Amino acid sequence: MTDPRHKMAATGLGRLLLRGGLGGSRRFSAAAAAPEHQSARLWKILSFVVALPGVGVCMLNTYLKSQEHSHERSEFIAYTHLRIRSKPFPWGDGNHTLFHNSHTNPLPTGWEGDDEH
């Protein structure tokens, strides 16, 4: 005599297989039915309407925040482990780095130029 639980499991598995639940039936989403050119047009519009103004707002915010701060040079402290020159750089006078900025990068001897920054 068969157990009724086995019969329920067998019929449930049979129904599942007949429906294609474990099979390879493919179901596509409704969004994929739209043509590709409509999707590309949507992203182009979003780029110009949302992304570019967003970048502009971020740039404006950064500029306005930077204007609030004072731009004074900090006092130069000659730490022994910083700005070590064991041999001169192969360009210029050998003491300035390749992308040297006199307003933000001090030399080993201190800030160059006037102190009226």
Image (cartoon, helix red, strand yellow):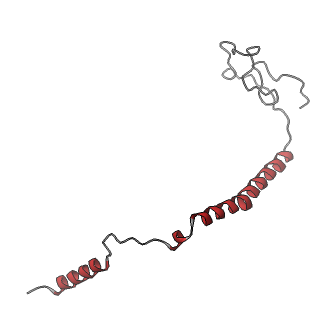
**Most foreground residue, 73 or 1:** 1
Q: Quadrant of residue 111?
A: top right
Specify whether 95 is left or right of 112. left
Q: Quadrant of residue 107?
A: top right
Query: Which residue sits at x=19%, y=84%?
Result: 5
User: Is residue 57 depicted above or below 39 in this figure?
Assistant: above
Question: Would residue 75 appear left or right of 28 to someone viewing this image?
Answer: right
Q: Which residue of the protein is positioned furthest toward the right in this rendering? A: 116
Q: How many marks?
A: 0
- Give the residue at x 66% y 12%: 87
Q: In the rendering, at what x and y percent does residue 54 appear?
A: 74, 57
Viewer-nearest residue: 96 or 111: 96
Quarter of the C terminus within the rendering: top right
Q: Position of residue 25 (x, y in %)?
A: 35, 72
The spot of residue 103 in percent (x, y) is 82, 30
Residue 93 percent location from the top left of the image: 77, 14
Quadrant for the N terminus, please: bottom left
The residue located at (79%, 49%) in the rendering is: 62
As drawn, the residue found furthest toward the left would be: 1
**Residue found at x 27% / y 77%:** 17
